[in-house]
Amino acid sequence: MTSRTRLPAVFLAPPLLILAVLAFVPTAYAIYISFRNRELSRPDGSFVGLANYIDLFSDRRFVNAIGVSLTWELVTVTLTLLVAIVLGILMFEFASARQRAVLTLIFLVPVILPRVSAAFVWKFAFHPLYGIVTYPYKAITGQPLDLLSNPATALMTVALVDVWQWGLFFGVIVLKLLETLPPQPFEAARLDHARPWQIYLYVALPMLKAPLISLTFIKMIESLRAFDLIYVMTRGGPGIVTETLDMYAFSQGFIESGRISYASSMAVLMMVATTVIFTVIWKRVKP
Amino acid sequence: MSLSRFLGKSVLYLAAFSAVFPMVWTAINAFKNRVDIVTPTPLFIFTPTLDNFAYVLGRDSVAAGLVNSVIAAGGSVLIGALLGLPAAYAIARYPNRWSADIQFFVLSLRFLPPVAVAIPLMVIWLDLGFYDTRISLIVTYTLLTLATVIWLGVPAFARVPKEVEEAARVDGYGPYAVFFLIALPIASRSLIGAVAFAFVLVWNEFLIALMLTTSDAKTLPIVASELTQLGRDVPWGILNASVVLLSIPPLLLIGILSGLLNNAFRRKSN
């Protein structure tokens, strides 16, 4: 295949140049404005050094947002993987080939929906007066159930929508992964009178360790995109209970004060944290 | 049928129901008058109306949002495909010492939190005078589509049998002819899936559009989300109708996308 040709350079140079410009210019610019005190209302600003970063660490809302974001990551990643593994195994064990094909299509629906749609659909389903999910509670107790305005349940309710979107989709992937496994270890385990759950727990899942770790990694990255759901469903409320880092950066930069530089310093910290963490994980996971 | 079989199937049916019902219910509500939605008990039998869809489709903001969405998603997907497919082919077929690094760079773009890209880009587009334009949206979205097409295109091209390409070369095809006439048609099914995925990604995109537009270039998700934030007398029927409208294009592509998924795993198992 290695006859001398300039094809690789011709095919690779323009797109890589564009990607590099589109990725590095905003990154550099974010760092630049994070050292200034630019605001939306004023076109310029002056150099303030690390002042924005120092302010961040005494900002209780920022510290709160870190906590919310970490909780969000932990809850959505864990539940998504759990749901996916259970559904994948159930399909593999109980569904015929045709049923699998139908379920695959059905389980793709939530993840394909625009997140704005998914957020609205569930927000309305959880509506305390007219929601279809809250209706049984209301009918039995006579009390309206307002999950999204209750600080104790708001974040988990939004997380449920995220798990609904990704858990079902990943269930399909787990099924496809199980289908790629050779049948012999299963038969051997069955001959040894292993129970079905033992076969999955001790034979199948360990064989899928590498792809499952990759799935976890992908979900960790996708869980960073919590903004759409939270923006439509709670706007960070009640109070600041569901205010993740991106939601807080957005409201600092746009809704409340237009402090672009301050929001930028948050963005830079997020960028550094995610890039470092994910690069380390990727290099570890990838053989 | 054993108990575990019954339970397992029940869980599957329940999950399938949960996947579809919320959207079905939304679609049902989109055909209701407001009085039929705002009831103490959810109504399944009612006189359907087309008023909500007529209202949504008749609104200038929705029409403008639809046009903006089509142009922004269409333009960025077109650029992403034109530049991304050749790049993916080059990575798949002409590996060199930077191939792994290039692939990691393309993947690592996904690590960037959207808000961290959107804030500086907003300032840049403001300074350049392109804030709230379709051009700025297309260029920004190209970052997403290009990376996605490359990322999904590499395995699609790698699955094209090498022998076919070598046979073409023996027949006197040049490297470019091999790409355009052999590799591209053979891999086309997976590649269409990759491009469709890129389209769904930018069609659904919300945060960047929210930050980069205020009025002229607002895309459909932004318009829909503004409708959902309306005040006290919420026009629920209209809301449901606009959500249905927004969700139709991605749902139409579901067959192509599941094909992409099946292809990716079928070849691997052989």
Image (cartoon, rainbow, N blue to C red):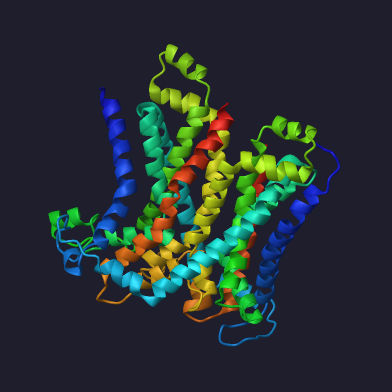
- At horizontal 46% and vertical 61% (from top left) the residue drawn is A68
- At horizontal 54% and vertical 36% (from top left) the residue drawn is B263
In the rendered image, residue B54, in percent from the top left (x then y), is placed at 29, 69
- At horizontal 50% and vertical 78% (from top left) the residue drawn is B216
In the rendered image, residue B215, in percent from the top left (x then y), is placed at 48, 79
Query: Quarter of the image holding residue B58?
Result: bottom left
Q: Residue pushed farthest top?
A: A191
Please tell me which residue lies in front, B162 or B43: B162
Q: Is residue B212 left or right of residue B3?
A: right
In the rendered image, residue B227, in percent from the top left (x then y), is placed at 35, 72
Q: Is residue B127 left or right of residue B212?
A: right
- At horizontal 74% and vertical 35% (from top left) the residue drawn is B168
How many dots with numbers? Answer: 0
Q: Can residue A286 be seen by looking at this rendering? A: no
Please tell me which residue lies in front, B213 or B185: B185
Q: Quadrant of the N terminus of chain B?
A: top left
Please tell me which residue lies in front, B254 or B165: B165
